[in-house]
Structure formats: structure tokens, C-alpha cells
Amino acid sequence: MSYKVAVVGATGNVGREMLNILHERQFPVSEVVALASRRSIGSEVTFGDRTIKCKSLEDYDFTGTDIALMSAGGSVSKQYGEKIGKTGCVVIDNSSHFRMDPDVPLIVPEVNAKAIKGYTKKNIIANPNCSTAQMVVALKPLHDAAKIKRCVVSTYQSVSGSGKAAMEELWTQTRAIFVNDPVENNVYPKQIAFNVIPHIDVFMKNGDTKEEWKMVVETGKILDSNIRVTATCVRVPVFLSHSESINLEFSREMTPARAREILREAPGIMVVDKPEDGGYITPIDAAGEFATYISRIRKDETVKHGLNLWCVSDNLLKGAALNAVQIAEVLCRDYLSKAKRINSEM
């Protein structure tokens, strides 16, 4: 059984990765359509060894399309998401627009795949924030084993999370510093090269940034709203992969050895944890990899049942494109295939 898939925002970083992953994971496509804004009509993207020319999102009729993987920003999702869903096409949206909509499931397949069944209310499924996605993959198996009470997370987020312009800004600033040219910042409020910026998204009334708020509320919706989460989100001069320092307090004992054992058996996770030089994962190691990597698992002696760990994942993959394709895989296997079979027998 095969499916017609449209990739909305196909010329962006995440859109291109979606096309790569659909091909790499041999997703059962009957046809792949690349969609972007009118100014990108005719732009070429690749799907395996094929070249696809982009069509206009504004002019495309989604009737007969099974799945739309959207990564074109919140304003585009707001304008087109529900319209696409009403045609019968299921939208898997990478923006923040639908994440907290009570009629839209927010999904990380390793954590809450069963919640996908709620997609029928609007024919929309939301992809979580990149920093939330990798964290809940790590938290889920530990929470099942010993119930997490509190989570304190500090993120070290790569510039690719801000798009191609941010990656170019890091490159041009770095080059400018080496050749003694003026350093200009347009994407970020301060220089990002050789610096860190404790500010991602807009500031809210309580002093948190919206990125920090997302990690709190999205973890509650995906995993457990009883987990108390506090976050500090920081942009760092790294091109790919987000890193997170996570401190957990459990309801009952969770030793580092037991945590390693649990995480090694958990889906989507690779444990690389040796207390020696290089015995841990860094952003460069995780770039281009599907797994969420866990290192530096150790006891927090300041609380009764505390644990520290280091979590690294490619934010364009598990934090966006890979997670969306994994959602599509579960959707097709458990829901759309049955509907197609029924329709073909009628």
C-alpha cells in the first residue's frame, strides 16, 4: 500500500531533510510533491536520485493527497493547516501553531504513539519543539520506571534551529573575526560567533522565553503534566545538533547503573557513557544521526533520588524531520492503511 505525500516548505533545511528521510527509510510513497511559496516555483530538490521541481503551495489542490508534511513556519500553518485537513489529507505540522490545540495530538512516537488516534478531529498532528522532542525520548523510559517529579534542563541549541540565515550568520561572523572585518548581526540580537546567547524566541511576562515555556507545556502534553519542568534555553555557536544538561528528581530510587540499563533498551536512544576522555557524545558526533544520544549519567547527591545526564540529538532530524516521518509511519501502519483497505473493498 502506498501513499501520496506532499512536503510543504521543501526548499528549507527541514523540508529537504524530510525528503531525504522519506527516501532513506523507504517510506511507501506512490508520489512525492514538493511545495513552497510562489517565488520558489521551479526550484529543484532531490528525492533519492530523482530531482523534483517545486510547485506553489497557494495553487496546489490537496484532494487525493494522503499526507502533508509541513515545515514552512507558523503563519503558513495557521493559514493552510485546517484547510488542508478538510480535504481529507492528514497534516503533520512542524510549526508551533497547533501544538497546544486540545484537538490536535502532539506526538513523539517513542513516547505517546497511541495518541495519534486523536488526529481525526482536525486531520492534523503536531510535531513538538526540537528541544522538547529529544528530551522526552530520554525521559519516557526513566519516568515509566521510577516516576520523575522534577526536571531542570539547560539547553545548548545550535543555530540551525533558527534556519539557513542563522547558519550563514555564524559562518560570516566567524570569517569576519578571523580576517578582522566588521561583525554584523541580523538574525540574533547579539554576536553568535564565539559567544552564547541565553535567549531563544520572545520574552514572556514572567521572564521566561517562549522556547523555555514550550519545553514546559509540551512535556506536560506529551509525557506527564505532573512533572515539574524548568528550563533555560541557550543558543550556542554550533551549526548542527542540540545538547541538553538534564537534572532529574525521581519519586523512588534510580541509580546511574539502572538508568543506563533502562536507556540502552529504550527505542531511539544510544547510550555512550564512559567516565574517561572522549567517553561521551558531542554535537558533531550526533550530526546526521537518527538516535538521541545519552552520556554523563551520574547521581545528583543534592536530592534523595536525583540523576544528571547529557542528551544530544540532531535537531533537524529527531527534532523535526525524522520525528515527522516517524509519525507518518505510525499513521499509515495503524490508521490510513485500514481506511484505504476498507475503501478499496467497498
Image (tube, rainbow, N blue to C red):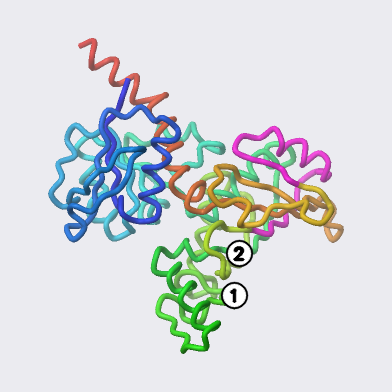
C-beta proximity under 8 Å, tags 2 and 1: yes
Amino acid type assigned to the residue bearing label 1 in the image? Val
How crowded is the residue under tag 2: few (<14 C-alpha within 10 Å), some, or many (20+)? many
Q: Which residue is mark 2?
A: 156
Number of callouts? 2
Q: Which of the two residues, 336 or 151, is positioned nearer the viewer here?
A: 336
Give the mark nearer the N terminus: 2 vs 1.
2
Tell me the number on the disc at residue 196.
1
Above-or-below relation of 29 to 254: above
* Res. 114 mark: none
Image quadrant in which the N terminus is located? top left
Q: Position of residue 12 (x, y in %)?
A: 34, 56
Q: Residues within 10 Å of mark 1 (few under 14, many from 20)?
A: some
**Residue 204 seen by the camera:** no
Q: CA distance from mark 2 to mark 1?
A: 9 Å
- Measured from the top left, where is residue 127 in percent x and y? 43, 47
For label 2, the SS is strand
Q: Which residues are magenta?
A: 244-272
Q: Nearer the viewer, residue 114 or 187?
A: 187
The residue sitting at 57% across, 66% down in the picture is 233
Q: Look at the numbered disc 1 and give the secondary structure of its residue.
A: loop
Magenta-colored stretch includes residue 247: yes
Where, by quadrant of the figure, is residue 87 drawn? top left
In this view, the residue in front, 227 or 140, is: 140
Three-letter amino acid code at the position of disc 2: Tyr
Query: Toward which corner of the image does residue 48 lie, by quadrant?
Result: top left
- Does the segment drawn in magenta span residue 214? no
Q: Residue at x 56, y 63 (%)?
A: 157
